């Protein structure tokens, strides 16, 4: 393989299985060739380090095993045994008239996922325990001394300080990011909705039925609604990203142009729009274009129209208006970014271009634009993926409307996938379809991000622009 060539997707998969096989073989070799202390450590974690007087490591491994066993026996196993059914007995009444709450599908699913994550973490710690025993045997065979308790403790604050520092954040990532995402993915394969609300009612696994409903174009399916909202989401993200980008760049170039006076004043005015809380300005602007708002009121007062323009009632007008009004929020940010970058373009390039007879447009196309796109490529990708999930603009301006009976799930013509997901969750309590939409949002965002990221010039050739 060439030095600069990255392995393909299939190559990475093959490499993973090769590594996994080698790791399993290493575990077998360690057990077969290890002494009795190492063999016992396969069952009683920390046994070997404790007998070798590495008490800090031994106690840590042994405590991890005891904690894991206690968790599984007294808590985790009780939920894991019901993972296949998510409960069999719902809320009811006992013979004496008291309420019998029965099983709780929500807690069964949540704590089962948590237990699975803990099992995976325990396997990792157990593998580390085996590796520590193997390394200890190797060092003793070479006549070297093992690390003392003090050395182990000092290493946690020295060469292994990164692991000590990251322990708590990694735990937080698993609890507050990995666990909710795994739970959401699992909910997409259940019938968790308003009629199956825990603890009053149980919900259960339904396989791929929710995904079939999403891509079904029947009267009760979500296919037509999903395609309509997906296309609008992509169109919105495209215009919200690139319209703001080029207009913001144009404003920055205009303000930076020689001969323009009061440069600081114009920049200050634009920055003031950022200082105003976004939800205040968006709510105010949304009301301005209402049927009884300022815009329609003045247009009728001036005799330009006879009746109010349905800005938020007409799907096409609403979409165009949202894209245009988004410039109010986006252009100042882009202007500030472009202003700093434009100052870094060597003036000699422009001077040389003028000597060669290039006009302003040619200098922009050959010098300014390539430089800006090269430097801001990753930023543009971030903006695009952010706009795919831009909840504030849509919800505060139009609320996703106008709605229609032809759209299912309470969706509106200006809803993005993320605002539709919000409505499915909060208004319809249709958690199963909301989870499916969440998975689709992730897939759309991930696919677009990976494809665009791999073709960015600043990623493919970091030294290409000189």
Image: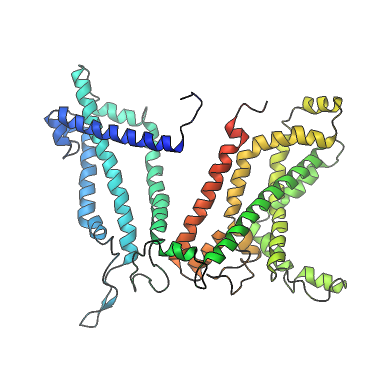
Instruction: From this view, report whether residue 375 is shown above or below residue 212.
Output: above
Query: Can you name the residue that lies furthest to the top here?
Result: 143
Q: Residue at the location (55% across, 60% down)?
A: 417
| Relative image position of residue 54 (x, y in whole percent) | 21, 30
Instruction: From this view, report whether residue 7 is shown above or below residue 213.
Output: above
Q: The C terminus lies in which quarter of the figure?
A: top right
Colour mapping:
rainbow
Q: Residue at the location (86% across, 71% down)?
A: 304
| Relative image position of residue 272 (x, y in whole percent) | 72, 51
**Front residue of this view, candidates 289 and 12:** 12
Q: The N terminus lies in which quarter of the figure?
A: top left
| Relative image position of residue 370 (x, y in whole percent) | 71, 34
Q: Is residue 430 left or right of residue 17?
A: right
Instruction: From this view, report whether residue 426 is shown above or below residue 135.
Output: below
Q: Residue at the location (65% across, 35% down)?
A: 375
The quadrant where residue 276 appears: bottom right
Q: Is residue 254 left or right of residue 230?
A: right
């Amino acid at each position: 393989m060439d030095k600069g060539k990255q392995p393909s997707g299939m190559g990475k998969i093959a490499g993973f299985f090769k590594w996994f096989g080698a790791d399993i073989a290493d575990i077998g070799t360690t057990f077969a060739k290890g002494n009795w202390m190492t063999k016992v450590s396969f069952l009683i974690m920390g046994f070997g380090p404790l007998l070798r007087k590495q008490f800090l490591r031994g106690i840590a491994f042994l405590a991890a095993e005891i904690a894991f066993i206690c968790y599984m026996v007294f808590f985790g196993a009780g939920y894991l045994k019901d993972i296949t059914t998510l409960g069999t007995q719902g809320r009811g009444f006992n013979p004496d008239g008291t309420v019998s709450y029965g099983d709780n599908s929500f807690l069964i699913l949540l704590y089962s996922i948590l237990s699975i994550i803990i099992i995976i973490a325990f396997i990792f710690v157990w593998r580390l325990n085996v590796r520590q025993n193997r390394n200890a045997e190797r060092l003793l065979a070479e006549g070297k001394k093992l690390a003392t308790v003090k050395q182990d403790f000092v290493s946690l604050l020295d060469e292994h300080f990164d692991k000590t520092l990251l322990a708590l954040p990694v735990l937080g990532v698993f609890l507050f990011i990995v666990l909710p995402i795994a739970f959401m993915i699992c909910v997409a394969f259940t019938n968790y909705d308003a009629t199956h609300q825990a603890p009053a009612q149980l919900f259960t696994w339904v396989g791929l039925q929710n995904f079939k409903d999403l891509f079904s174009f029947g009267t009760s399916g979500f296919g037509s609604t999903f395609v309509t909202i997906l296309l609008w989401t992509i169109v919105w993200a495209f215009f919200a990203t690139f319209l703001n980008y080029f207009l913001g760049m144009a404003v920055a170039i205009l303000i930076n142009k020689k001969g323009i006076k009061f440069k600081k004043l114009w920049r200050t005015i634009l920055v003031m729009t950022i200082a105003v809380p976004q939800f205040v300005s968006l709510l105010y602007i949304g009301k301005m274009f209402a049927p009884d708002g300022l815009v329609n009121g003045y247009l009728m007062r001036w005799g330009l129209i006879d009746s109010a323009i349905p800005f938020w009632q007409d799907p096409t007008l609403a979409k165009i208006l949202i894209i245009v009004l988004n410039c109010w929020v986006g252009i100042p940010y882009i202007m500030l970014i472009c202003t700093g970058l434009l100052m870094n373009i060597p003036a000699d390039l422009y001077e040389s271009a003028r000597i060669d007879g290039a006009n302003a447009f040619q200098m922009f196309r050959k010098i300014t634009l390539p430089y800006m796109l090269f430097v801001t490529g990753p930023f543009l990708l971030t903006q695009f993926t952010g706009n795919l999930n831009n909840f504030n603009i849509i919800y505060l301006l139009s609320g996703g409307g106008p709605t229609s009976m032809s759209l299912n799930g309470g969706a509106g013509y200006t809803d993005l996938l993320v605002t539709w997901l919000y409505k499915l969750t909060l208004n319809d309590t249709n958690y199963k379809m909301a989870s499916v939409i969440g998975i689709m949002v992730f897939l759309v965002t991930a696919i677009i991000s990976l494809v665009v990221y791999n073709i960015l010039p600043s990623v493919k050739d970091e030294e290409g622009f000189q």
